Image: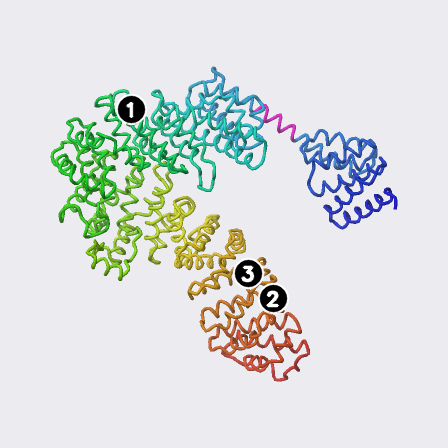
Amino acid sequence: MEAAVTAGQLRKQGNALFQAGDHAAALATYTQALSLCDAESERAVLHRNRAACYLKLEDYANAEADASKAIEADGRDMKALFRRSQALQKLGRLDQAISDLQRCVSLEPKNKAFQEALHTLGSSMHEKMKKMSCTDSKVDQMFQILLDPEEKDADKKQKAAQNLIVLAREEAGAEKIFQSDGVRLLTQLLDTAKADMMLAALRTLVGLCSGHRSRTTAILAELGAPRLSAVLGVEHEQVSLAACNLLQVMFDSLKEGMQKDFRGKEDAVVLDSSKDLKLLIKHLLELLALEGASAHGRDNALNLLIKVVPRKSPKEINNSLSLWVIDQGLKKILEVGSTVCGAQDSLPVTENSRMSASVLLSKLYSDLKCDAERENFHHLCEDYVKSWFEGHELAGKLRAIQTVSCLLQGPSEAGNRVLELEGIMDSVLSLCASVCEAHQLVAVEALIHAADKAKRASFITANGVSLLKEIYKHSERDSIRIRALVGLCKLGSAGGTDFSMKQFAEGSTMKLAKQCRKWLCNETIDAGTRRWAVEGLAYLTFDADVKEEFVEDKAAMQAMFHLAKSEDRSVLYAVASTLVNCTNSYDHEEPDPQMLELAKYAKQHIPEQHPKDKPDFVKRRVRKLLAAGVVSALACMVKSENPALTNSCRELISRVFLALVEEAEDRGGVVAQGGGKALIPLSLESTEVGQTKAAQALAKITITSNPEMAFPGERIYEVVRPLVSLLHLQRTGLENFEGLMALTNLAGISERLRQKILKEKAVPMIEGYMFEEHELIRLAATECMCNMAMSKEVQELFLAEGSDRLKLMVLYSGEEDEKLRRAASGTLAMLTALHPPICKRIPQVTAHWLEILQALLLSPNVELQHRGAVVVMNMMAAEREVAEQLIASEMLEILSVLAKEKDKPRVAQAAKESLAQAVAYGLIKPNPNQE
C-alpha cells in the first residue's frame, strides 16, 4: 500500500476520533499521518487539523504554530486563519488575532460567524486599550503627584500613594508600574528621606516583588543591596519594618526561584539566585555591627536572618547558607549579643536584641550536620570571647561575660564551652560583688544562665549562693536584687519536681516565690525588670507549694498574663514554663515498681512526687488559671512574630493547652476565648512533640464540641492535617484513638471535609487501625470508615481487586462486640445503599455472609436489626440472583416475621420492602393478608 494512501486513511481516522471527542488520539493520528505525507497541500490540511486539536487541548502556542504552517501553504485558508485568530486571542495577542479575523471577513464577507467574532474581539481590544491607557496615565499621574516638590496637598499625596500600593498588588498593575520606569521613580521616592514617601515606595515594591523572581532580581539590581540595608537601619520604626517586609518578600521570591531551578533548570540561574541571596545576607550581617544603624533596624535584620538562613527542615540536604553565614558573620552576630547597655561606644539595641541574637545563634548551631562543623562554631565563639577577655581590661571582660550569657541562652553547648575558658567563671563571681550596677547586672545574669544544669548548679551553690544572698539582702537597687533572686530561685529548683531533692532549707523557696510575686505585681518597676520575677517563678514553680500559692494570687497571675501580652517578648518562655509547671503538663513517667524495689535495695536515689501534685490538685489549679484568663494570654503569645517565640516555646504553650482541655466541660470556654484558633498554628509549626500535643488538644475539642462552631468557616479544613498526624504509627494508642474519633466527627459533616481527609492520605491509616488489637481503637477506626464511606472514592475501594475491606466489614458485623457490630453493619447499610455493585460482591467475600445477616435480623438490639434489614433490602433490590440466594435461605421466614413487628416500624418497613421486591422478581407469591 502506498504511503499517500496510508496518510489519507490516517487523516480520516483522525477526523473520526476528533468527531468522537478524543482530541489527544486525533492529534497523535494526524501527527503520524504527517510523517508519511510529502504532498504540500495534504500536509497543510493535516497542520490545520492539528491546530484544531491543540485548541481543544488548550495548547494555544502549538495551535498558533500549526495554523501558521497551513497558512504558509495557502494564504487564503480561512479555517487555518480562524483557528490561528482563536489561538492568538487566548495568548493575549489581540491585535494579531484581529488582523487574521479581518482577513477571514474579507475572504468571506457574508460569514456571520466571522463577523460576530470580529465584533466581539474588537470590543475586547477597545476595552483593553482603554484600560491600559487609563492605567498608564494613572501611573504617570500618581508618580507626578508624589514626586512634585510643589505639591502641598497632603491628602492628595496620601491618596496617590495608596492607589499606587493597591495597583501593585495586582499582577497587571505591578507589571505596568515595572514597565513604566517605575523602579527608578520608586527609588527617587526612597531617596526623599520623607517617611510617608518611603513607606509608599516600599509597600509598592512589595507588590512588584511578590512571587515574581525575575522582577525581584531586576529591582535588586536597580536599588542595590546597600540602599535596602540602609533603609532597614533608619530610625523611623515603621519605615524599617516596611523595609524588613520588602526584604522578606524578596528573599521568598529568590529562594522559590532557587528551589525551582534546583529541580532541573539551567545551573547559571541557580548561581544568580544564590549570589543575590548572599549579597542581601552579607549587607544584613554588616548592618548588625554598624554603629549608625537603629536598634529596631538591628532587630529586624536579626529576625530576617532567623527566617531566611537556617533550613526549614532537616530533610533539606543543603546547609551551605548557614555555614557561609557562620564563616562570614558569626562575630557580627556576637557583637550584638555581647553589647553591654549603657557602656561607652555600645551598639544601639532594644530589650529584644540579645534574645534575637541568641535565637539566631541557636538556629545556626542546630543547622550544623557534623562534629567538624560544630567544632568550627565552638572555635569561632572561643576566639571571640578571648579577644575581649584578654587585654581589654574591665570593659573587655564585661563584653566577654555578656557573650557567654548570650550563648548560654542560645546554643548552650557553645556557652558551656566558653564558660570553661580560664578565668571566665572567676570573673563572673568577682563582678557579682562590684559596686557598679551595670557590672553587677552583667555578672548576675551570667551566673543565672550558668546555673542551668545540676552539675553547674551544685558548683555555684558552693561558690556563689552566699554572694547572691548578700546581693539580694543588701543591694539598694531592685534591678540587681531581682536578678540575684532569680539566681537563688534557679539554684533552689535544681531538684526539679523531685520533692526529695531540694537545694535549700524548708520554706526558703516559698519566701523567694512570695518576693517574686510581690515584684511582679509592682507596676512602678519597669517591665524589663519585672520580667525577671517571672523567670524566678519559672524555676520555683517546680515546687507544688509554690504552684498552689501562685494560683491563689489572682493579681500575680493577671500581672504575668499582662506581661505576656507586652512588647517585651523575651518573657514568653518564662511565662510558658511557669504555666507548664502549674498544670503539670511536662513529661513524667510512672516508675516501674520492680525498678523501685531494686533502687531501694541498691540504696539509690528514688524521685518522690509532692502530695500537692496529685491529679485533684492539678485539676483545681487548671480551673483557677482558666478563670484568671490564661487562654487569651496564650492566644496573644502565639500571635507573636518575635524570634523569642521559638519552637521550644511553642511546645510549652501546646502542653499547657492540652492540660487546659483535659476536662470536657472546660473545652467550650477555651474555644470561646480563642484557644481553638491558636492551636492550629501550634499544630503545624513547633517541635514534633509540640505539634503532637497541639493536635491532641484539637482532637479533644473536635470530639466533644460541634466542629463547625469550634472552627468556623475555612478554619475547619485546617484542622484535618493535624488530626491525621495523630494516626501515625509512632503516636501513642490514646493519640491514635482521639485522632480517629475527631476525624469521625469531621467526616460526618460534609463531602468537602471527607475529600480533605482523603487528600491527606488518611484512609490507609484508618484501615490499618481496623485490624488493631485494642478494641476501642478498632471500633473508632470502623466508625470513622463508616462516615468516610459516604464518599464515592471510598466506596470504590471496597470493590478493589484483592482487597479484604468488604470481607472485614461483613465479619465485623458478626462480632460479639455490640458497638463494633453496630459500626460495621452501619457501614454495610450505607455502602449497599450508595453503591449497589457492593451488594453483588457480599456473597463472594465469605461463606458466612448469610448467617451474619440473619444474626443481625434476629438481634435483640433494634438498631442492629434495622441496619441488617436495610442491608438485606438493598441487596434484594440490587440483583435478582442475590435475591434468590437470600430467599432460598431462612431469610424469607425471618423477613415475614419482622414485617409484622408493629413496635419496630423502621425494621418492619425494610422487611416489607424486601418481600415486595421478592414478589416483583416472581420469587414468592404475594400475601393477600399483607398490607
Q: Sequence-wise, which precedes: disc 1 or disc 2?
A: 1
Which residue corresponds to mark 1? 387
Tell me which amino acid carries mark 3: Met
Image marks 3 and 1: residues in contact by CB distance under 8 Å? no
Image marks 3 and 2: residues in contact by CB distance under 8 Å? no
Magenta part of the chain: 128-138
Q: Sequence-wise, which precedes: disc 3 or disc 2?
A: 3
833 above or below 176? Answer: below
* Most foreground residue, 719 or 116: 719
Residue at 57% x, 30% y is: 267
Q: Secondary structure at mark 1?
A: helix
* Most foreground residue, 798 or 215: 798
Residue at 44% x, 39% y is: 312
Which residue corresponds to mark 2? 838
Q: Secondary structure at mark 2?
A: helix
Q: Where does the image place residue 616, in percent across and percent down from the top left?
A: 25, 58
Mark toward the viewer: 3 or 1: 1
Q: Sequence-wise, which precedes: disc 3 or disc 1?
A: 1
Tell me which amino acid carries mark 1: Ser
Mark toward the viewer: 3 or 2: 2
Q: Which disc number belongs to residue 371? A: none
Q: Which disc number belongs to residue 790? A: 3
144 above or below 853? Answer: above
Q: Where does the image place residue 308, in percent across and percent down from the top left?
A: 44, 33
Tell me which amino acid carries mark 2: Ile
Q: Where does the image place residue 772, in percent across and percent down from the top left?
A: 45, 63
Residue at 15% x, 30% y is: 433
Q: Secondary structure at mark 3?
A: loop
Q: CA distance from mark 1 to mark 2?
A: 78 Å
Q: Is residue 740 magenta?
A: no
- Horizontal side, residue 762 vs residue 53: left or right: left
Quadrant assignment, res 593: bottom left
